[in-house]
Amino acid sequence: MGLELYLDLLSQPCRAVYIFAKKNGIPFQLRTVDILKGEHMTEQFSQMNCLKKVPVLKDGSFVLTESTAILIYLSSKYQVADHWYPADLQARAQVHEYLGWHADSIRGTFGVLLWVKVLGPLIGVQVPEEKVERNRNCMALALQRLENKFLRDRAFLTGQQVTLADLMALEELMQPVALGYNLFEGRPQLTAWRERVEAFLGAELCQEAHRVILSILGQAAKKTVPVPPPEAHASMQLRLARIP
């Protein structure tokens, strides 16, 4: 069996892995794991990842979890263009610098609106408005720091070429946009960065990868989003409770 990627394109890290593999012509078998249907909670999936999360990479008998680790593995194994994950020590360190900050300041913040508008209501949980407002303030602060610390006067987050940092950032920032909050509005520098990244990736690939998340609000309005099975509710409630 060749390379298998277990993904749900509702997930930001999964989309980053999907786009990277597609853009670089890496051959893989897509194994869709529908989180809303609880497919990540099955015994079969748990045998691959006991954390019950996507993405997961399976390369023969080798199994790898966590999107950053997967992207670095794919970059190294398939010898993709150097700009993605530079061989130069200092350039590579800057990619890691962003990814470390991303995990701390971006990852848990920009996905909150999906929980507020879609996932919470599916299991009967409403997030208080003061938490929603606090989340928007946190996003605004993170975006300001993203521009001031990383983007600055550069074309991309760590320099003049696209890296794994830009891909990870784009997918997180697309999440609230898809949920009706256009965080690029009033931010011309960030908007220009997004346009450069999407132009590099290609409009067709971006549309393909974003189709699921861009349709989720419409599905929720029509009540066609599947209700997660009861065994998924406890972990979902825990995630909702952790919204600051």
Image (tube, rainbow, N blue to C red):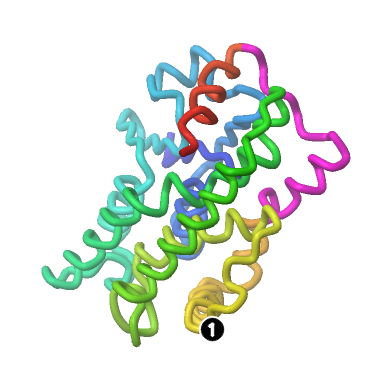
Residue 241 location (% of width, % of height): 51, 27
Residue 89 location (% of width, % of height): 11, 68
- The residue positioned 29% from the left and 80% from the top of the image is 159
Residue 212 location (% of width, % of height): 69, 49
- On screen, residue 40 versus residue 88, left or right, reads right
Farthest residue, direction right: 222
Which quarter of the picture shows residue 65? top left
Residue 102 location (% of width, % of height): 34, 55
- On screen, residue 219 versus residue 83, left or right, reads right
94 and 84: which is toward the camera: 94
Which residues are the magenta region? 211-230
201 and 37: which is toward the camera: 37
Q: From the viewer's perspective, is residue 185 above or below residue 45?
A: below
The amino acid type, in three-letter code, at marker 1 is Pro
- The residue positioned 33% from the left and 49% from the top of the image is 103
Q: In which quadrant is the N terminus drawn?
A: top left
Farthest residue, direction left: 89
Residue 47 counted in the magenta span: no
Identify the residue under disc 1.
188
Q: From the viewer's perspective, is residue 56 above or below residue 49?
A: below
Mark 1: few/some/many CA within 10 Å (<14, 14-19, 20+): few
Residue 214 counted in the magenta span: yes
Counting the numbered discs, the total is 1
Which quarter of the picture shows residue 64? top left
Farthest residue, direction bottom: 153
